[in-house]
Image (cartoon, helix red, strand yellow):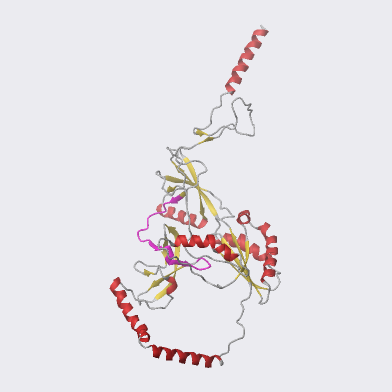
Amino acid sequence: MPIVIAAKAAVESARINLAYTKVTSPISGRIGKSSVTEGALVTNGQADAMATVQQLDPIYVDVTESSNDFMRLKQESLQHGSDTKSVQLIMENGKPYALQGTLQFSDVTVDESTGSITLRAIFPNPQHALLPGMFVRARIDEGVSPDAILVPQQGVTRTPRGDASVMLVNDKNQVETRAVTASQAIGDKWLITSGLKAGEKVIVSGLQKVRPGVTVEGRRGYRDVRRANKVRIPMSKFFIHRPVFAWVLAIIMMIAGGLAIMQLPIAQYPTIAPPAVAISATYPGADAQTVQDTVTQVIEQNMNGIDNLMYMSSTSDSAGGVTITLTFKSGTDPDIAQVQVQNKLQLATPLLPQEVQQQGISVEKSSSSFLMVAGFISDNTSTTQDDISDYVASNVKDTISRLNGVGDVQLFGAQYAMRVWLDGNLPE
């Protein structure tokens, strides 16, 4: 009899162990690759998971938004009396996601390092087009403004403090500068919430040719331009048809200039600008206030005690960039000043956020003006501005930067860029 009982117990133990060989998923979804092979020994509480199950339909999308934008979104929700916001997604290839999601909840704390809040939206995903870990762009519909004013981005300029302004033509046909509030970018335009009224004329091209107070005249059509040219042509023709008068006038001006130069208070040598050293850093995702508190002030506090330092100036923008310019007394060796700044910066680097250290901090000798400005053109009509800019950046900029005495080289013009997407549906 005891033998029978022991056999039944063995059978029951085998049945229980057999049940352990079948693992049931706690949630429904899709399973990825297994981290163990067939026949391997697995135990309860092991460090490596046997497999990972991902819930794909519906799927959550986490979005980070600055605290200022979050407060505006919250205010819009209170005005409309609804906490449900529709969310649209833009895929990595620039195409919109076909289905619309809803905003589920927002975090209750603000990330002190970036000044942002995490929002979570839920999206239906029946075709499994969205996968965990994918980067997308989210657009939250805050409402419809029928009287919104959009201004092209090239017509809006910003001061070093980040304040936006535009140049417009007033009722007296005079150019004036007006401060505006640009809340957000919509495509290639800025949404202007204050400072402009419907019907006002904003200058979007040729900003370098106008200045406040100048009277302008609007012209329309090709005939008006030709009439304007006819007004300017007689001045040049006057001297072309009277070469003797032109030579006599030029000789008189040269003699007058030679006599007057002896009486002018001209210094033997021009005034030399004091040397300066610029420190540049980037804090990705942080606003201007966060950059000022966590990066700019930390570096400035460690710059005290440098020899011949007169003053410091700094700028922090909303894109996470910071530039600190240290100006020294005239006669200071700029190379020695740069070495002293680098030594002081080494003391401040461990106190900066990890993201800033990963991006790198540059120290360069700075100048308030350009020594030389060179332009590049091409006789080939098929060459575009992007082609010329790419050639200069690849073959000219680095060569000039390595010349003795050159502190910095800046490239103005269209930057050549290329974006590549991979079609995952193509066979390998």
Above or below residue 379? Residue 286 is above
- Residue 296 seen anywhere in this rendered image of the structure: yes
Q: Quadrant of residue 114?
A: bottom right
In the image, residue 158 lies in the stretch drawn in magenta: yes
Q: Quadrant of the N terminus?
A: top right
Q: Give me the residue at 30% from left, 75% from top.
A: 226
- Residue 318 seen anywhere in this rendered image of the structure: no
Residue 162 screen position, x and y as percent: 51, 65
- Horizontal side of residue 368 vs 94, given as left or right: right
Q: Quadrant of residue 300?
A: bottom right
Q: Give me the residue at 44% from left, 40% from top.
A: 129
Boundaries of the magenta span? 138-162
Residue 415 screen position, x and y as percent: 48, 60
Above or below residue 281? Residue 313 is below
Q: Give whichever of 327, 43 is nearer the camera.
A: 327
Q: Residue furthest left?
A: 223
Residue 216 screen position, x and y as percent: 37, 76
Q: Give whichever of 179, 306 is nearer the camera.
A: 306
Q: Give whichever of 136, 387 is nearer the camera.
A: 387
Above or below residue 168? Residue 387 is above
In the image, residue 66 lies in the stretch drawn in magenta: no
Residue 421 screen position, x and y as percent: 46, 47
- Total marks placed: 0
